[in-house]
Every structure is written in structure tokens, then in C-alpha cells.
Image (cartoon, rainbow, N blue to C red):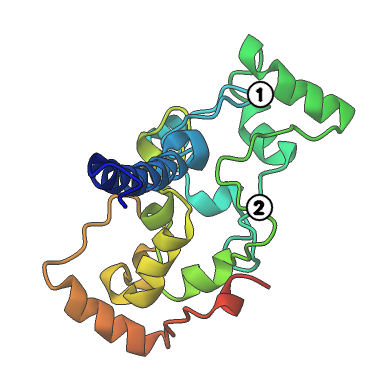
Amino acid sequence: MQVFHRSTNVLSRFTIFGGLFVIAGLVYGLYLVNSSPYVTQQGVAKQQPIQFSHKHHSGELGIDCRYCHTTVEKLAYAGMPPTQTCMNCHSQIWTNAEFLEPVRRSWRTDESIEWIKVYDLPQYVYFDHSIHVAKGVGCETCHGRVDLMNVLWQKPTLQMQWCLDCHRQPEKYLRPRQFIFSMDYQPPGDQLELGRKLKEEYDVRTRVECTACHR
């Protein structure tokens, strides 16, 4: 005796396969959301408490990255400039500019300026600027052409896959140490050959185990 009509077989197949497509669509949707600027903050300009242009200071005036980020070659953190660094110049020029009053107030009160972090890694991620600089990774590789940015924004996604792409094939990104802080460095046509040479010369190790970044 047949309990269910034959059309039930078609309906059940449609339900099963339809459900699978819905689940796949939801997973893909979550992937898109997780990779979007809404989550990663990639390409999102961060307004700072004080009007500051990297394009003007780094690009037009040619100020070296290390003048403000003094610990980038020595410590895990590149460091933010103290108000003294700003006042080295602005005690002499633009001394009455209204938009620089927060800098002068910080100098008078000895209260630090609360800059907004643009590259804000989670607390469970360990990143050392000094080791990357020492191994031939240029500032522009991760931070982009900051010398062309009036308002700073995050170039990469900062997601784990982005880090692993470089850790698995560092020879694609390495440059001679004398060009680490050059914003307009152009890699040669034989980048992979140069990268392999620098990888051996600088003793670059392709660490992809979890403990390399999660400590």
C-alpha cells in the first residue's frame, strides 16, 4: 500500500537540494561580509583628532618614516611621535594655525594626543615591525603609498590569509634594505630571482605555524 503520493519524492528532493543551496548561499554571504571593508576596515579612512597629511609631510616634504616612527627598526611597535616631534617644526612654522591648536595645547599641558589607530590588530595577534624591516619588507608593502594619502587608510585586509600569502612566498615581496623606507620603490622585472637571493642573504624563514603570530 502506497502511503505517500509519488510527487512527494520530487518535493523531498527539491527540499533537500534547495536546503543545500540555501546553506551554501548563507556561507558564501558570510564570507563576503567577513571580507568586506565593513569588517576588515580596508580602505576606510580614519579621521584623526588633528588634521595631519602624510602626503604633505612624507611625500611633499620628504620626511623619512623614522623621524616620527622612531622605534620601527628596534621594537615590535613602530611608535607614535610625541608632541615634541611635532613642535620641532611647528614652534617655528604655522605657529598660529587654528587647526594646530590641539598640538600646542598638548605641548602646554603635557597631555598626549589621542591618535586613532589605523592598523589595529587583535590582541591575540603578535606582529613585530623590527623583524620585518630587518628581513627586507618595505613600509609601502604593507602600508601602501602613504606619501600620497592626505588621510591615512588601511591598505590590506589584515586577515590571516593576507599574512600567509607573504609568509609562504616572501621572495615575491622582499627588497634591498636600502629601499625599505622608499615609497616609490619599483621592483625589478626579475623580482622572484632577487627575492630568492635576498631570502637567503637575510636568512628569511617561511614560518607558517600558528605560534609564529599567535602567542
Question: Crowdedness of circle 1 by 10 Å Cα count: few (<14), some, many (20+)?
Answer: few
Residue furthest to the left in view is: 189
Question: Which residue is painted at 26% across and 48% down in the image?
Answer: 9
Residue 212's place in the image compared with 3, above or below, is below
Residue 154's place in the image compared with 93, above or below, is below
Question: Which residue is painted at 23% across and 40% down in the image?
Answer: 7
Residue 205: x %, y % from top left: 44, 85
Residue 164: x %, y % from top left: 41, 68
Helix, strand or loop at mark 1: loop
Residue identifier under label 2: 79
Helix, strand or loop at mark 2: loop
Residue identifier under label 1: 49
Residue 52: x %, y % from top left: 54, 27
> Is residue 134 found left or right of 186 in the rendered image?
right
> Is residue 195 found left or right of 166 in the rendered image?
left
Residue 154 in sight here: yes
Residue 69's place in the image compared with 5, above or below, is below
